[in-house]
Amino acid sequence: AQSVAQPEDQVNVAEGNPLTVKCTYSVSGNPYLFWYVQYPNRGLQFLLKYITGDNLVKGSYGFEAEFNKSQTSFHLKKPSALVSDSALYFCAVRDTNSGYALNFGKGTSLLVTP
Amino acid sequence: KAGVTQTPRYLIKTRGQQVTLSCSPISGHRSVSWYQQTPGQGLQFLFEYFSETQRNKGNFPGRFSGRQFSNSRSEMNVSTLELGDSALYLCASRTGDGDYGYTFGSGTRLTVV
């Protein structure tokens, strides 16, 4: 089965510092990987995706992610964190056994302190 | 353009009742998927509809069902509600095959008492 893992329940970072939210994947074949963010009582907002092409993917709100095939990772990064980045972040992979269904990680809560 | 619209935003139902949730996709999107989000199980895929046909179904009991209309709007129905059905139900739409731009709605928060 296609799956992703987010090893950290929570990440704390000071405003202005770089942030990284980790994600590793386990898939057969080429992975289709996604990052979403969720604010309280809201749905999921798309940040970026990797389908094919450059390993460094740039997304919304200054976020980027690096696809690393040898380490089976797809970590989310931002050079300078903002307090408003505090939210729940989900990594997801397309489940090719179920059409276009997404399998999500359990989520990582990011807290950016002033 | 308008996003994915889910109604209602909040629902409180009694155990044993049934409930219907609605999702209106972005104009031009023909695929609608449903997900359940709970603190314990996280985000789980329920089913996907494309052009009024269910294409895939997640590992949920038959109490969970859905349908899609000719205008691509979708409804999800849960019968014989259980306390464990309390969750945020999210709908996502995309244009169709080859499109990986899943756009999610804000969800319907269902509480079963």
Image (cartoon, coloured by chain):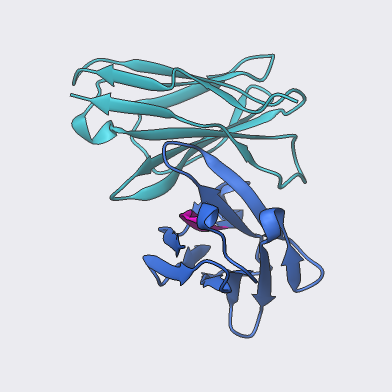
Q: Is residue A25 visible?
A: yes
Tell which of B13 and A29 is nearer to you: B13
Is residue B79 in view?
no
Q: Report if residue A91 lies within the magenta region.
A: yes
At a point 75% along the width and 74% down the height, the residue shown is: A55
> Is residue A107 depicted above or below B79 in this figure?
below
Q: Could you tell me how many numbered marks the image carries?
A: 0
Q: Which residue appears at 66% of the width and 20% of the height? A: B72
Report the magenta residues as a range. A86-92
**Residue in view at x 46 percent, y 70 percent:** A13
Residue A7 or residue A31, whichever sits in front: A7
Q: Is residue B69 left or right of residue B59?
A: right
Q: Position of residue B47 (x, y in %)?
A: 51, 36
Whether B13 is among the magenta residues is: no
Tell me the quarter of the picture where residue A35 sits: bottom right
**Looking at this rendering, what residue extends furthest in the bottom direction?**
A70
Find residue B12 and report its image quarter: top left
The chain assigned the colour blue in the figure is A
Answer with left or right where residue B17 lies relative to residue A102. Answer: left
Q: Residue at the spot x=21%, y=28% of the render?
A: B82
Image location (x, y in percent) of residue B87 = 33, 35
Residue pushed farthest front?
A114
Give the x, y percent position of residue A60. Answer: 70, 53
Give the image location of residue B102, x and y in percent: 65, 42
* Depicted B35 relative to depicted A59: above or below: above
Indicate the quadrant where residue B2 lies: top right
Q: Which chain is cyan?
A: B
Q: Predominant secondary structure in magenta? A: strand
